């Protein structure tokens, strides 16, 4: 049986891992849109994707989605997945396109799309680029300067963020450098959050693909 081009999907908000009593919304998804959402949870893992499509349920961005389960053959799924990006270690690190930095600890649980551990702190470029009074540099400037000498290592592709990820290991010297920059350059609210650097093992820089 051919796969439907349009799929009826129901969804509602989740609260603390439980389905809430808030209204159920109905919406029509194209198959490509549904697959895009599932990829944000699984990454490009065909077995998990087939299982979720067959079960007809997934949690994504604090919502629970349901649809009538879909049976899809391996070859058919493989052809569909060709339309989505793949990790590409040959892509050079481009600091100017990075939009966020994920401060992570080695023992953190995995992110939803299996692209690494969940961050203990997420820093967005806009907030980290704010400068303090009488300062020309921002903490974001200091972070990218710290990343430049060794060029962070490629760390995969996040389907949820539609971005390539680059990993910057935090040795003692670099951690101290960034902690000092946080104290002198970061605004007060961000400065408090950046105490998480003390427990971090690495920082992942999020660089969206312009062609995704």
Image: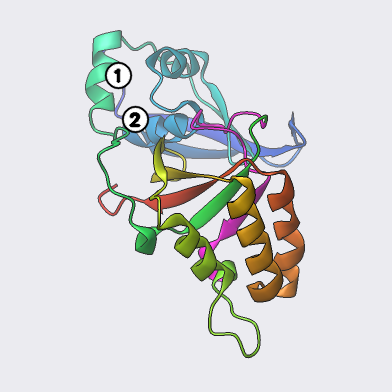
Residue at the location (26% across, 25% down)? Answer: 80
Contact (Cβ within 8 Å) of mark 2 with mark 1: yes
**Left or right of 210 on screen, residue 100:** right
Question: Can you give x and y, in whole percent of width and height, for residue 81 in the image?
Answer: 28, 26
Q: Secondary structure at mark 2?
A: helix
Q: Bounds of the magenta span?
A: 108-126
Question: Can you give x and y, in whole percent of width and height, for residue 74 in the image?
Answer: 30, 9
Question: What residue sits right under mark 1 in the picture?
Answer: 3
Q: Nearer the viewer, residue 115 or 136?
A: 136
Q: Nearer the viewer, residue 71 or 100?
A: 100
Q: Which mark is residue 31?
A: 2
Above or below 144: residue 20: above
Question: Can you give x and y, in whole percent of width and height, for residue 145 in the image?
Answer: 46, 64
Q: Residues within 10 Å of mark 1 (few under 14, many from 20)?
A: few
Q: Quadrant of the N terminus?
A: top left
Residue at the location (59% across, 29% down)? Answer: 110
Question: How would you classify the magenta stretch by its main secondary structure?
Answer: loop
């Amino acid at each position: 049986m051919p796969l439907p081009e349009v799929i009826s999907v129901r969804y509602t908000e989740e609260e603390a891992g439980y389905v809430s009593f808030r209204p159920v919304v109905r919406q029509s998804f194209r198959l490509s849109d549904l697959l895009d959402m599932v990829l944000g949870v699984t990454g490009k893992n065909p077995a998990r994707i087939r299982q979720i499509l067959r079960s007809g349920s997934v949690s994504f961005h604090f919502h629970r989605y349901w649809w009538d389960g879909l049976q899809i053959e391996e070859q058919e799924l493989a052809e569909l997945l060709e339309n989505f990006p793949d990790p590409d270690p040959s892509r050079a690190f481009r600091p100017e396109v990075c939009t966020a930095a994920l401060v992570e600890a080695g023992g953190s649980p995995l992110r939803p799309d299996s692209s690494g551990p969940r961050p203990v702190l997420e820093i967005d470029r806009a907030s980290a680029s704010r400068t303090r009074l009488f300062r020309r540099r921002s903490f974001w400037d200091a972070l990218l300067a710290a990343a430049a000498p060794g060029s962070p290592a490629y760390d995969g592709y996040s389907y949820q963020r539609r971005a390539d990820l680059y990993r910057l290991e935090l040795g003692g010297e670099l951690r101290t450098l960034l902690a000092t920059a946080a104290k002198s350059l970061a605004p007060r609210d961000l400065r408090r959050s950046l105490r998480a650097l003390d427990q971090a093992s690495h920082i992942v820089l999020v660089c969206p693909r312009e062609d995704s």
